[in-house]
Image (cartoon, helix red, strand yellow):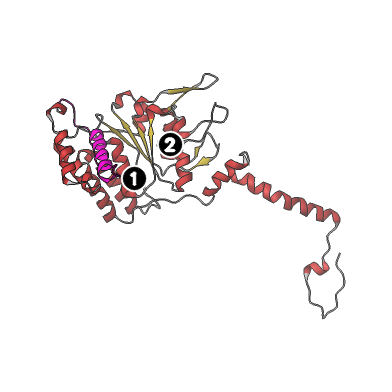
Amino acid sequence: MVKALSESAEIEPMDYIRFSAKDEERIKRRVRRIPELRKAASGLEHLKRDDRERLEVLKDGARLIRIPGEHRADEIAAALHEDMPWMAPATELVWHAMRRSVREGAPGLTIPPLQLTGPPGIGKSYFGRRLAALLAAPTTVIEATGENASFGVVGSQRGWGGSHPGRLIETILQSRIANPVMIVDEVEKAGNAVSMKGHAFGLAEGLLPLLEPLTARRWSCPYYQVKFDMSWVIWVLTSNDCRLLPEPLLSRCPPIRLRPLTLAELTGFVRREGARRALSETAIEAICEVLAHPSLQRHHPSLRIAARMLQRASDLEQGPILH
């Protein structure tokens, strides 16, 4: 209904428009539906409140680590090669990937999945951690031998006993960075999990959609049952014998075959890392002498042993002294 107004009155639409009771009720119903429609559009309506609140940190997306220029890519590659010259095949692949990301103007750094295969003790997982440190990227190391198949990486579906989100989505939720470095150590030794209904599920099957860019862009989290873009994640898989891995995984993540490191390379690493930790020359040279002892020459030089000795020396030199 429109009521009459004097010519001098200022016209305000709500002064002369009146809705019927039926129209007002219809408007109120639509207003009440707005929050429900927004929730449905988010794809989170099936989640419990606690889970929705956890995912709320990603409502505006996650940050991408990027390389500012090709010169920085060269610096990172040079630092990796100086630290671990025996890892040159892996360093070269990372170097080209970093420069390609810069040339193509990508919004973030993309590195194809790395599958480092070689003898134990050469620092394959250390390479991944060192790369993450140089990129200032969050990193998660997953021991495949200690994980319940793929559940530790990708999580388990609701309905499985003790269902939980995986380390991948947890890393992104905590860091709010979309391209963390995810290291899966000794991937060929992962076992299978069996559900209460007798269905087996292995780590390789869980990783396959994450290693393929097209499927990784719309990866569905088993636990949250929400799709995420995981195509930016930097994967570093390590193995001692890639022949034990299934062919589908090898095709998506071709092995980078690495040689054993030499004693000279190992002692060079000890001197560089010891200086980085501010160890005394006496401690550094003592570690080098032990590593060069004939009793250890029957085995391949091991970066793992050297790292433990460096840590022990650091604890002794920098820790408190008991009187």
Residue 29 - label: none
Part of the protein shown in magenta: 298-323
Mark 1 or 2: in front is: 1
Query: Above or below — where is 243 with respect to 106?
Result: above
Q: Is residue 223 magenta?
A: no
Magenta span: chief secondary structure: helix
Q: Which one is earlier in the sequence, the residue at label 1 or at label 2?
A: 1
Q: Which residue lies furthest to the top in this view?
A: 198
The answer, for residue 51, to whether it is visible in the render is yes
Which amino acid type corresponds to the residue marked 1 in the rendered image?
Ala
Please give the name of the residue rendered at 22% of the width and 44% of the height, measured from the top-left corner: 274
* Location of residue 191 by image quarter: top left
Please give the name of the residue rendered at 44% of the width and 34% of the height, measured from the top-left corner: 153
* Location of residue 235 by image quarter: top left
Q: Position of residue 127 (x, y in %)?
A: 28, 40
Which amino acid type corresponds to the residue marked 2 in the rendered image?
Leu
* Horizontal relation, residue 199 to residue 50: left or right: left
Q: Does the magenta stretch include residue 319?
A: yes
Q: Where is residue 280 in the image (x, y as percent from the top left)?
A: 19, 46
Residue picked out by circle 2: 210
Depth check: 164 or 81 in front?
Answer: 164
Query: Above or below — where is 191 with respect to 85?
Result: above
CA distance for labels 1 and 2: 19 Å
Residue picked out by circle 1: 132
Q: For mark 2, does the 10 Å Cα neighbourhood hold few (<14), some (14 to 19), or many (20 or more) residues?
A: many
Callout 2: SS:
helix
Q: Position of residue 16 (x, y in %)?
A: 83, 68
Q: Quadrant of the N terminus?
A: bottom right
The answer, for residue 44, to whether it is visible in the render is no
Q: Where is residue 230 in the image (x, y as percent from the top left)?
A: 45, 42
Depth check: 323 or 31 in front?
Answer: 323
Callout 1: SS:
helix
